Amino acid sequence: MTSPTRTLTVVCPVYNEEEVIEAFYDALNRVVEGIADRYRADILFVVDRGTDRTLDILKAIAGRDSKVRVLALSARFGHQMALLAGIDHSNADAVIMLDSDLQHPPELIPALLDAFEQGHDIVFTIREDSPGTGLFAR
């Protein structure tokens, strides 16, 4: 089996996610392992300085998984700046930005990559609300 030649970085901004970060990593890692024949992928968690144990948890994950990198910002810069920092720290062929609060399903990654492989430079998703979604959530 030949090694994939394309590279992927999944950039995940993180802020106070200690309750869900392990579950998010597990779900994302399953997807990344599932595309290993197509992409040499890494996961970049960008920690927007928080007040919980998220950074410690991510350092432990990175210690046992060489695909995981952690970028800890020096102060609270916000979601968009965390994404930008992640993009700046990637040199991959493709970058996927994925929030780490389990509201963006990692299972969409193969479909996003399919569109990228068809020649699209920018691929995005559109959230579809279910009929029961309340006004606040919409």
Image (spheres, helix red, strand yellow):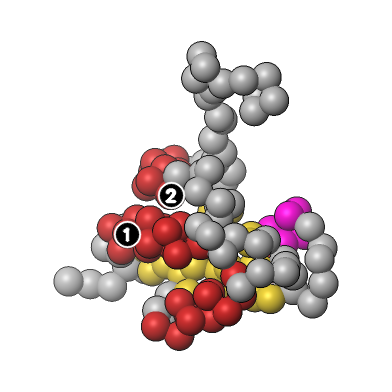
| Magenta-colored stretch includes residue 28 | no
Q: Is residue 88 above or below residue 115?
A: below
Instruction: State the image quarter where residue 53 is shown.
Output: bottom right
| Residue farthest along the left direction in this orientation | 1
Residue 69 horizontal/vertical position (percent): 54, 76
Upstream in sequence: badge 1 or badge 2: 1
Q: Position of residue 85 (x, y in %)?
A: 72, 66
Does 125 appear above or below 70?
above
Give the residue at mark 2: 106
Residue segment shown in magenta: 79-83
Marks 1 and 2: CB-CB under 8 Å?
A: yes
Query: Secondary structure beneath disc 1?
Result: helix
Helix, strand, or loop for circle 2? helix
Q: Position of residue 7 (x, y in %)?
A: 45, 66
Quarter of the picture containing the N terminus is bottom left
Q: Confirm whether the magenta stretch covers residue 80.
A: yes
Which residue corresponds to mark 1? 30
Quarter of the figure with residue 15? bottom right
For image coordinates 58% across by 43% down, the residue present is 122
Residue drawn at x 53%, y 24% is 128
Amino acid type of the residue that numbered disc 1 sits on in the rendered structure: Arg
Q: Residue at 28% across / 58% down in the picture?
A: 34
Q: Residues within 10 Å of mark 1 (few under 14, many from 20)?
A: few
Q: Please tell me which residue is depicted at 45% across the width and 44% down the height of the picture.
A: 105
Task: State whether residue 135 is above or below residue 55.
Answer: above
Q: Main secondary structure of the magenta part?
A: helix
